[in-house]
Amino acid sequence: MNGLIAFVNLVDRLNERVGRGVAWLTLLMVMITFVVVILRYVYAIGWVWLQESYVWLHGVVFMIGAGYTLLHNAHVRVDIFYRPSSARYKAVIDLFGSFLLLLPVVAVVTYASYDFVADSWVRLEESREAGGLPGLFLLKSVILLFCILIGLQGLSLAARSYLVLIGHPEFQPEEEETEPI
């Protein structure tokens, strides 16, 4: 049991750190977007590489931040029944949801994207746009990093749910604060 607890804590810490780190990229993305707008509309200057950089950052933030989002129970859910339910019911739903939905989808995405990413690395693929960014193969690698981080967090969620079901209430997810509409 201690190994399972250690695994949950390790994965949660990993995704917490990765999520907080990648969050800083949103600030960089906003600053680059601001520069692009000023250069384009004030000085009539446009660089494709600069425009691509904020689009790539956007993809990186969403893909790498997905594990952090799952850690904090912030993914979109159809939670008509889930939100008002007991911790035990939520743990059952999370356990089965992880094994029957999340992890199989992660496995399919990993399988489907591996050759796509590997081929990009073999060719050291660059942007197709003239003047675009080199290193598109690095951006495509984020797909596999996404699979690793969200897969680990899915396993952590399943383990956390199992721990709640066997009597470890300290592993219940935090309750969300909701504002009245």
Image: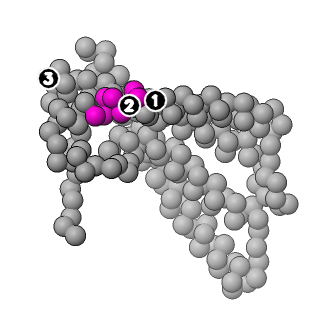
Q: Relative to 124, is 5 on the left or the right?
A: left
Query: Which quadrant of the rendered structure holds the N terminus?
Result: top left
Amino acid type, label 1: Leu
Viewer-nearest residue: 144 or 91 = 91
Q: Which residue is mark 3?
A: 167
Identified at 49% across, 29% down, the residue is 104
| Residue 176 pos. (x, y %) | 22, 51
Do the residues under discs 1 and 2 have CB atoms within 8 angstroms?
yes
Q: Residues within 10 Å of mark 2 (few under 14, many from 20)?
A: many
Numbered badge on residue 144: none
Q: Relative to 106, is 172 on the left or the right?
A: left
Query: Which of the two labelled residues, at mark 3 and mark 1, occupies the earlier sequence position?
Result: 1
| Residue 149 pos. (x, y %) | 48, 34
Q: CA distance from mark 3 to mark 1?
A: 24 Å
Q: In the picture shown, does residue 65 fall above or below 148?
A: below
| Residue 59 pos. (x, y %) | 58, 52
Q: Which residue is mark 1?
A: 103
Q: Residues within 10 Å of mark 3 (few under 14, many from 20)?
A: few
Q: Quadrant of residue 52?
A: bottom right
- Residue furthest to the bottom in view is 42
Amino acid type, label 3: Gly
Query: Which of the two labelled residues, at mark 1 and mark 2, occupies the earlier sequence position?
Result: 2
The boundaries of the magenta stretch are 93-100
Q: Quadrant of residue 159?
A: top left
